[in-house]
Image (cartoon, rainbow, N blue to C red):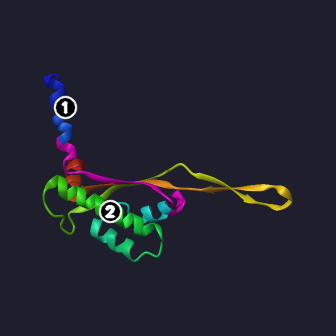
Amino acid sequence: MGVRKRLSADKMKEERKSVAFAKLTNIPSSPRKMRLVADMIRGKEVFRALGMLKFSNKEAAAALEKLVRSAVANWEQKNEKKAESGELYISTIFVNCAPMLKRLRTAPQGRGYRIRKRSNHVTVIVDTIDNNAKNHEA
């Protein structure tokens, strides 16, 4: 590897050091329902978002709460310190469609109606709040 390429690779690794993410794939819930919950916590401080998810009556909130906890644990593992209140926030969260199961339901007069059982993939990226302030100043 050349010097220039090594320097840019080291720079990218250093930038990714403070950012941690977690992915959850093939959740058996429709992406539309999951996006309602994801929109609720986008940009929020992590512990506030966890509180919102804990007391939400949506079924998707339980899966998302577990995912956010995993992202926080990944951040703690990368940075070798415990996350404090007010330090981390959910910088990015997005929901993508996963492959759907196609089933048939019996219908009148020998026909069949198609049922699409949808599923989704969710990605959560957690970042430090002070790191975000540095990026906007530059």
Q: Position of residue 81 (x, y in %)?
A: 13, 60
Q: Is residue 54 above or below residue 96?
A: below
Pick whichever, 92 or 54, lies toward us: 54
Exactly how many numbered labels are in the figure? 2
Query: Residue pushed farthest right?
Result: 109
Q: Quadrant of the C terminus?
A: top left
Q: Position of residue 5 (x, y in %)?
A: 19, 26
In the displayed structure image, the side of residue 82 where residue 47 appears, left or right: right
First-in-chain label (2 vs 1): 1
Pick whichever, 99 or 94, lies toward us: 99
- Residue type beneath disc 1: Ser
Q: Is residue 10 above or below residue 113?
A: above
Q: Quadrant of the N terminus?
A: top left
Disc number placed over residue 68 in the picture, else none: 2
In the displayed structure image, the side of residue 38 where residue 131 appears, left or right: left
Residue 26 drawn in magenta: yes
Q: Residue at x 57, y 51 (%)?
A: 100
User: What is the crowding at mark 2: few (fewer than 14 residues within 10 Å), some, or many (at least 20)?
Assistant: many
Q: Which residue is mark 1?
A: 8
Disc number placed over residue 45 in the picture, else none: none
- Residue type beneath disc 2: Val
Read off the magenta span. 14-33
In the displayed structure image, the side of residue 20 where residue 122 appears, left or right: right
Label 1 element class: helix
Q: Residue at x 24, y 53 (%)?
A: 132
Instruction: Please say whether residue 128 is visible from this viewpoint.
Output: no
Q: How far is mark 2 from mark 1, CA to CA? A: 30 Å
Label 2 element class: helix
Q: Residue at x 52, y 56 (%)?
A: 119
- In this view, the mark in front (2 or 1): 2
